[in-house]
Every structure is written in C-alpha cells, then in structure tokens.
Image: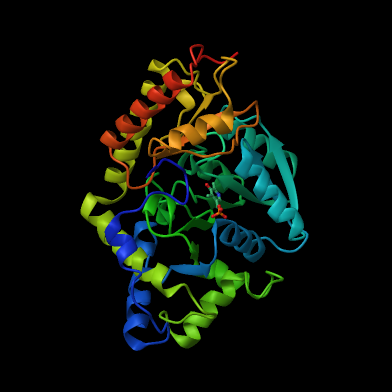
C-alpha cells in the first residue's frame, strides 16, 4: 500500500526493521544511543550545545504541543494563536484546557498570517506573552513561516512557540537564529520519517530554568525533563519510553543525513507537492489553496461537483488500487481531499498515485471534477 497521508507517514523498511528487538531502556548501551539522538536532533534544529536542550516526550504530537504551552506560558498567561486551519484551532483548545488564555486570531484557512497582523495584535494587548504558531498548517497546507514572523515577535519583546510537527526537518528553522523561540516542537514521524510514538521540543536552557515548576503537570513538564537529565544523565528517561521507536528514529536520522538533510528533504517534498498539485489540476480538480500559498507538505483539492462522486466510496476504491489517502477532511471552507507529499515518497510514487486517482475517477464515472 502506498500511503499519501500526513502522519503517520510512509516509512522506509530499514526504519521499521529497527524495531525488531526487545530493549531495556536503562541499559548502558541504549542510554548512549538515546543521548546521541538528543544531540543529533538539537543539531538539526540549529541548537547550540550548552544553550539549547532536546526534550523528548512519550506520545503523539498533541502531547508535546500541550507540554510546550504549559511549560513556558504561566497559568492564566495569554497566548496569541493565529488560526488558519484545524491545527491552530487545536492549539486554542489545548491552551484553554490547560488554563492559559488563548487569544485566537481567526483568519480563514487560505493564507498565512501576515507579520503586520501579528505586530498589530501584540501592540493591542501588552498582556500577551507568547505567540503559538503552526508552522505548516496540516489542515489546509499553507505555511506560517517563523523565519518571517519570529523577528516581529522578537521586536515586540514576546516569545514564540512553534508547532512544527508537520514541518520540522523539511522547512528551514534554526534555534540559534531565533532568540525569541521558547520551543520548536515536532515528532519522530512526519518529515523525519521515523515511526510515531515520540515528541520532541528544542528549547533554550535559560528558559527551562526560568520556567521550572509552572507547567501544572508532571507528565507534560519540559523543565522537569531537563532537570531530570541534569541529575540522571542525558540517556535517561523519566518514564518508560517507546525504546524501539527511538532506535528506529536513529535509523531514520541516518537516512535523513544520507539524503542531504533539511535542504534535500525540502526539495524532495516540494517536488512531490508540485507534481501532485499539477497532476490533480490536470485531472480536473480545483486546488483548495491559491498557488502562491501552497506549501510543500500537503495538497488539498475540493471535491468534484459530479453527482457520481461519493467521498468514502472514492477513498475505498482508490485504496483497492493500492493508494491510501486521508478518509477525513480538514479544510475549514468546505470539504476536500487531502493528499500528503511527505514521508518516504519519491516522484514516481506520486505519479503512480495520480494514475490510480485517474483510474478511480474513470471507473466511478466522475466526469465533472472541478468544484461546484
Ligand atoms: C500531526 C500534527 C500534530 C500532532 O498530531 P498527533 O496526531 O497528536 O501526532 C500537531 N500539529 C500539527 C501541525 C500536525 O501536523
């Protein structure tokens, strides 16, 4: 099965094979393996030894996003959340449930947030201490670029938290160029192409020290992960880790380096997304985003107007031809087909999928593919 979904993404067989052994997480050899992975990840994030720390957390992306909000924003503190897709809405919910005051900026989901809008919102409310950004809005496919927005947040004297879950490793971002950043968070899966099960934050050590004790949760406290490492070593976990996922992640990082790191990964995904978008347009679909806002991670197209089109029937018929795409929709302005360009996918995989999408449309008698 060829999977074109934005998480868990398709992985390489070498990565999956690395999970085959039983592992004792506190074993000396494994501790060294884990500590080395923390350093590699910090380097990918442009972090500096002794200044930035890698904080791994068991669980999925939402856990590490919530942990970053709790750790750095005090209880009752205010966070500005540009909402231009489903993941922005999720940050609002995570922050609110954690007792932080989310200030949502509702923007529709067709364009990135502008630096001017961030600047104006921060000027209007001096109580806002943080801006929480979704870097690649996996709901719609657009990019809120922290390289453009970070300096505005910095100039306003506020802090930034980046949900880079569907961007990290592909979209360029370096902690050493972003003194305003409290955390860039991501997972073992998505653009780093490991197995799902672990989240990571990269954060400045001085901020982890300053924010000690304010998370209001032991399990989701990134400062506690840092202080635990200081006391027990960088190869130690507080609680049982998915050790096999971590080992497989090490193999995924080897493949990442061999490919050429961030620039190569971005180039492959951008090519995949362009081929995908052009191919879908050639098949008659209407893209959800304007060309200039299309990011390299995920492509959404509106559902065909043809009365023969039926969402779940289409997904199932495509699956029977060996191609899996999301069986749910995440765009805010009407439903869409969501197809990922990320994961262990090459251009020929995208072309294969386009061929199968075309075959499925023909087989189902779907002539009018443009949106209504
Ligand atoms: C995938 C994703 C997450 C996390 O999703 P989980 O299902 O919790 O792993 C968070 N933010 C963004 C932008 C994502 O794409």
The answer to whether 323 is drawn above or below residue 56 in the figure is above
Q: Which residue is at 41% across, 56% downward?
A: 176
Residue in front for this viewpoint, 210 or 256: 256
Work out whether residue 103 or residue 218 is closer to the camera in this orientation and state it. 218
> Which residue is painted at 64% across and 26% down in the image?
334
Indicate the position of residue 271 as horizontal and vertical percent values.
31, 32
Task: Choose top left, top right, bottom left or bottom right for residue 73.
Answer: bottom right
Residue 126 position, x and y percent, is: 73, 47
Instruction: Answer with left or right where residue 102 lies relative to residue 197.
Output: right
Q: Quadrant of the C terminus?
A: top right
Is residue 356 something one can see in this rendering? yes
Q: Furthest-left residue in view?
A: 258
Q: Is residue 5 above or below residue 233?
A: above
**Closer to the camera, 194 or 319?**
319
Identified at 61% across, 37% down, the residue is 85
What residue lies at 43% left-to-right and 84% top-to-bottom? 233
The quadrant of the image that shows the N terminus is top left
Relative to 151, say whether 258 is above or below.
Answer: below
């Amino acid at each position: 099965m060829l999977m074109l979904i934005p998480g868990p993404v398709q992985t390489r067989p070498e990565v999956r094979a690395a999970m085959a052994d039983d592992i004792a997480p506190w074993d000396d050899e494994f501790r060294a393996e884990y500590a080395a992975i923390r350093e590699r990840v910090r380097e990918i994030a442009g972090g500096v030894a002794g200044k930035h720390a890698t904080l791994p957390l068991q669980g999925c992306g939402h856990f590490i996003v919530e942990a970053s909000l709790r750790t750095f924003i005090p209880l009752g503190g205010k966070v500005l959340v540009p909402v231009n897709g489903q993941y922005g809405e999720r940050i609002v919910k995570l922050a609110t449930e954690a007792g932080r005051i989310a200030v949502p900026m509702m923007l529709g989901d067709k364009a990135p947030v502008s630096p001017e809008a961030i600047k104006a919102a921060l000027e209007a409310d001096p109580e806002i201490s943080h801006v929480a950004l979704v870097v690649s809005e996996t709901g719609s496919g657009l990019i809120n670029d922290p390289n453009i927005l970070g300096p505005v947040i910095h100039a306003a004297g506020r802090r930034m938290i980046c949900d880079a879950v569907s961007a990290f490793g592909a979209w360029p971002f370096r902690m050493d160029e972003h003194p305003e950043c409290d955390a860039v968070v991501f997972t073992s899966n998505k653009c780093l192409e490991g197995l799902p099960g672990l989240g990571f934050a990269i954060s400045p050590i001085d901020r982890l020290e300053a924010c000690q004790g304010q998370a209001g949760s032991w399990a989701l406290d990134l400062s506690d992960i840092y202080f635990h490492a200081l006391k027990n070593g960088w190869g130690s976990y507080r609680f049982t880790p998915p050790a096999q996922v971590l080992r497989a992640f090490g193999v995924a990082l080897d493949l990442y380096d061999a490919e050429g790191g961030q620039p190569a990964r971005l180039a492959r995904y951008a090519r995949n997304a362009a081929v995908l978008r052009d191919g879908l347009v050639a098949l008659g679909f209407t893209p959800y985003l304007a060309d200039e806002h299309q990011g390299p991670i995920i492509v959404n197209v509106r559902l065909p107007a043809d009365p023969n089109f039926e969402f779940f029937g289409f997904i199932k018929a495509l699956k029977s031809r060996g191609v899996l795409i999301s069986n749910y929709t995440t765009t805010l302005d009407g439903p869409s087909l969501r197809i990922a360009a990320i994961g262990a996918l090459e251009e020929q995989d995208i072309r294969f999928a386009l061929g199968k999408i075309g075959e499925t449309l023909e087989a189902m008698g779907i002539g009018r593919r443009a949106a209504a």
